[in-house]
Amino acid sequence: MPQRFQNFIDGRWQDPKSEKWFDRENPATGETLGTFPDSGRNDVGDAVAAAVKAQAEWQRTPAPHRGEILFRAAEMMVARKEELSREVTTEMGKVLKEARGDVQEAIDMTYYMAGEGRRQFGHVVPSELPDKFAMAVRQPHGVVAAITPWNFPLAIPSWKLMPALVAGNTVVFKPSPYSPLSAYNIVRILEEVGLAPGVVNLVFGEDDTGAALVEDPRVGMVSFTGSMEVGREIAAYCGRHGKRVHLEMGGKNAIIVLDDADVELALEGAVWSAFGTTGQRCTAASRLIVQRGLMAEFSDRLMARASTLRLGNGLDDSVEMGPVVNQPQLQKVESYVGIGVEEGATIACGGSRLKDGELAKGYFFPPTVFADVKPKMRIAQEEIFGPVTDLIACASLEEAVAVNNDVPYGLVTSIYTRDVTKAFKAMEGITTGIVYVNAGTIGAEVHLPFGGTKGTGNGHREAGIAALDSYSEWKTVYVDYSGRLQKAQIDR
């Protein structure tokens, strides 16, 4: 029988009061991995109550000590890296080398935020009045709801949990139902390193579980990574009820390849960015904007690379691309391929799911490239979140930048060129939150801000020092030791 997992509330593993459960299967084989709670409002309410109860004591815990707990968690992740990586692969499908990268990113983020326990710098500035001291310091929001997707089941939770915790917040963590095992693993590690009961609480479940968490009035901040549609619903609710909200909602990212690019380097970046994690990254390159003089050579070589990528179970080290995460995602990819054909684009390679042999047991879709794509086609505007990319021709750098910017999202852009002048003009004109020069669109580093513009987010950033601005508030403090009433600007 598959293992039955429990929620983690107030320091105890417990069955859901809802008495409802769901199964999660391996997307490469169809085998059931485990049974998880489908939590109801009572379960969510208990988790939030535990976080409320623990918050004051956790906030009083010195920030360096909070950081030390995170450091021990990072050390435990290092010791268990291979085990954690294999379970990432079995539950969401990415190949093992990518799963190891997922775990390493969680390790890096946890180490980084552990250090922020001693670096939560504020501001001390001169007052405009005599005998008066002025400073600004950080304070936590209180209870943070962390709602995460399935595609980076350890990395993205670490982006939310670790800065929230080191800033003095308590957390109720609701992971995607498609990657619950990794969420269990990260919370189990935090439990083992001695995090106090109630500081982190884990509730498994589907859409209703997330809605109950967002709507609980005791939650001070919601941090969500997922689709634009759901993110906008959360933003609307939080706006009406005065909650802080941090959103990361996808991308329609492009690689620009100019005539003077290193073609081999650009091809490597395009294949990795379009088909890494089976295209299931918010940073995936789903548009390749290529200058016309290079298009024939680039497209021919891209088809040759894409059509020979080896698909299979990600636990096999020789496999280069795994399955999509589930049947609905497979159907979504298939539907967009149909949309592209109807719009007049040409399937240059791939285009239909694999239905024969061992791969038919899983949710496999081959690397797919569309040619003859116009910038306003739906396949060039909407996030597909699968192994599908578009070839779009352009005449100049200026046209490429304009096409790149003309989508609802604004996460990441890459440009390949040997001309430093063109590179800097592109950096200036591109409107996405992240820009790469002579590298693909994937590969963020934890000590720099991560996030985007327009429909990608709401101005907050993950990672780096910027994450502390998401998970804390500024408090300004004035100390007047003049012994008389000073009236600020009036006295001046």
Image: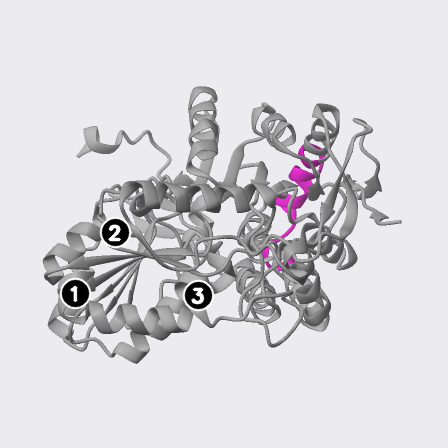
Which residue bears the numbered disc 1?
Answer: 291
Quick one: label 1 or label 2, which is nearer the N terminus? Answer: 1
Gap in angstroms between the C-alphas marked 3 and 1: 29 Å
- The answer to whether residue 241 is left or right of residue 176 is left
Q: Residue 169 is drawn in which quadrant?
A: top right
Q: Which residue lies furthest to the front in this view?
A: 356
Please give the name of the residue rendered at 74% of the width and 29% of the height, measured from the top-left corner: 43
Q: Which of 283 and 370 is in front in this view?
A: 370
Estimate how packed mark 1 is, as few (under 14), some (14 to 19) or many (20 or more) residues with alpha carbons within 10 Å.
many
Residue 75 highlighted magenta (yes or no):
no
Q: Which of 482 and 38 is in front in this view?
A: 38
Mark 3 against mark 2, which lies toward the viewer?
2
Please give the name of the residue rendered at 16% of the width and 51% of the height, measured from the top-left corner: 402
Q: Residue 445 carries which label?
A: 3
- How is the model colour-coded? one colour
Q: Do the residues labelled 3 and 1 touch (CB within 8 Å)?
A: no
Magenta stretch: dominant SS?
helix
Gap in angstroms between the C-alphas marked 1 and 2: 13 Å
Which residue bears the numbered disc 2?
Answer: 373
Q: Give the range drawn in magenta.
A: 51-65
Q: Residue 199 is drawn in which quadrant?
A: top right
Question: Is the residue 206 above or below the residue 180 in the image?
Answer: above
